Image (tube, rainbow, N blue to C red):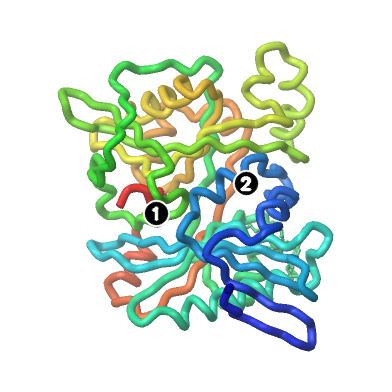
């Protein structure tokens, strides 16, 4: 039986917490149009995405019994200044298509925040990543009490002819050793857990000098704004050979996380990511980077490719709430660059 985490008899609303997605959950998420002005898309791979969140809390918002909203709260950790803080990563927030702007999103986000904070008995934080242009989602998060802690740039990484690299290996055994270890960074765990994302490493003289995890995403694009949108809509599909880089109906790309590189080996990071594209027969990847971090500088040096050059690089705000943090952790959260890890690493 699901737990009831919120009830409003006047509005005939109910929020249930399930241990796995209830009927209709995947279908609703598959119909949602995500993204904002510049890039709008539906996810064609919701069943796979949901599998990565096994062990999470699946919130179902119901109105007179009908499913009208979804939200996933994934137990994760945040590593900062030598401390590991229990955390909850919020993702897949959606209101049924056609039901937006009616206050349902706010009900869901508020109730989820209250429930999470009630569960916590020590230091705890919850975070979610919201595109800077997603005014509705940002407004709802702020009203519910979350604050902006900083931002990532969602940087696309494209290669016309991705080259493999013999130094790159796919590691089967889990490993928690990252080159450079992202010391001096705030490490947010988002993305997959339970070993669903393979880890790729690049070795030199036996040492891992660059590493990353990757999962494949599959979208259909529904609207692209701006100059990049014009190019993507009008130029790419009509240019032989280029459609493979960006097929709006069938956009497959690698989403990278747990990106790390040893100091002095920065140029090898792009080689690693490109080798993953080559092996998976893909031409595009996406990386969340903090412009203050070393991986960002490393990838900028090697060039991120066409879409990045066209200015497709939305800012993504980290919106969170925290309780009982030490002064040291709170200060590090404000000052240190952010890194996105996949929970598969621990
Ligand atoms: C984000 C989402 C869950 C919000 O749910 P919702 O039910 O529409 O949200 P609410 O009605 O509670 O609140 C929306 C508020 O956003 C604000 N808002 C919406 N569009 C806005 C805009 N273009 N500019 C400024 N504010 C805006 C308004 O303040 C509005 O509240 P109000 O009209 O009552 O004053 C919903 O829009 C959705 O499912 N979007 C698609 C999926 C998605 O983007 N998910 C979030 C990923 S981070």
Compared to residue 150, the image places residue 330 above or below, namely below
Q: Is residue 297 visible?
A: no
Q: Residue at x 79, y 57 (%)?
A: 97
Q: Residue at x 29, y 64 (%)?
A: 84
Task: State the quadrant of the N terminus.
Answer: bottom right
Q: Residue furthest front?
A: 1
Q: Residue at x 56, y 47 (%)?
A: 49
Pointer 2 with pointer 1, Cβ within 8 A = no
Q: Secondary structure at mark 1?
A: strand
Residue that mark 2 sits on: 46
Residue 166: x %, y % from top left: 31, 16
CB of residue at label 2: within 8 Å of ligand 1? no
Q: Residue furthest right?
A: 98
Q: Residue furthest bottom?
A: 10
Residue 109: x %, y % from top left: 62, 72
Q: Residue furthest left?
A: 205
Ligand 1 shows up in the quarter that is: bottom right
Q: Is residue 76 left or right of residue 182?
A: right
Which disc is residue 338 wearing? 1
Nearer to the camera, 251 or 327: 251
Compared to residue 213, the image places residue 107 above or below, namely below
Q: How much space separates mark 2 and mark 1, taking CA atoms?
A: 27 Å
Q: Tell me which corner region of the image, top left, top right, bottom left or bottom right, holds residue 180.
A: top left
Q: Is residue 171 left or right of residue 147?
A: left
Q: Nearer the viewer, mark 2 or mark 1?
A: 2
Q: Residue at x 24, y 32 (%)?
A: 209
Q: Is residue 24 left or right of residue 198?
A: right
Q: Secondary structure at mark 2?
A: helix
Q: Residues within 10 Å of mark 1 (few under 14, many from 20)?
A: many
């Amino acid at each position: 039986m699901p737990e009831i985490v919120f009830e409003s008899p006047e509005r005939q609303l109910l929020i249930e917490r399930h241990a796995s997605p209830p009927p209709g959950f995947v279908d609703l998420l598959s119909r949602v149009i995500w993204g904002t002005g510049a890039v709008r898309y539906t996810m064609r791979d919701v069943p796979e995405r949901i599998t990565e969140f096994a062990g999470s809390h699946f919130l179902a918002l119901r109105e007179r019994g009908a499913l009208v909203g979804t939200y996933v709260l994934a137990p994760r950790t945040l590593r900062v200044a030598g401390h590991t803080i229990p955390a909850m990563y919020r993702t897949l927030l959606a209101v049924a298509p056609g039901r937006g702007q009616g206050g349902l999103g706010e009900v869901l986000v508020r109730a989820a925040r209250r429930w999470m904070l009630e569960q916590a008995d020590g230091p705890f934080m919850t975070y979610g990543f919201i595109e800077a242009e997603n005014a509705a989602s940002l407004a709802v998060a702020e009203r519910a009490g979350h604050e902006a802690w900083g931002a990532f740039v969602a940087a696309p990484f494209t290669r016309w002819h991705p080259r493999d690299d013999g130094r790159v290996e796919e590691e089967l055994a889990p490993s928690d050793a990252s080159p450079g270890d992202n010391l001096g960074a705030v490490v947010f765990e988002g993305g997959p857990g339970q070993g669903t994302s393979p880890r790729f490493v690049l070795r030199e003289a036996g040492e891992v000098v660059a590493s990353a995890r990757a999962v494949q995403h599959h979208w259909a694009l529904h609207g692209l704004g701006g100059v990049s949108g014009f190019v993507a809509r009008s130029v790419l599909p009509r240019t032989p050979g280029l459609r493979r880089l960006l097929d709006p109906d069938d956009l497959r790309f690698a989403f990278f996380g747990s990106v790390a590189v040893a100091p002095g080996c920065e140029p090898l990071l792009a080689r690693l990511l490109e080798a993953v594209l080559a092996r998976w027969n893909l031409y595009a990847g996406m990386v969340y980077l903090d412009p203050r971090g070393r991986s960002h500088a490393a990838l900028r040096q090697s060039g991120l490719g066409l879409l990045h050059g066209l200015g497709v690089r939305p800012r993504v705000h980290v919106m969170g709430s925290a309780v009982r943090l030490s002064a040291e952790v709170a200060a590090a959260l404000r000052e240190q660059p952010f890194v996105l890890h996949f929970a598969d690493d621990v």
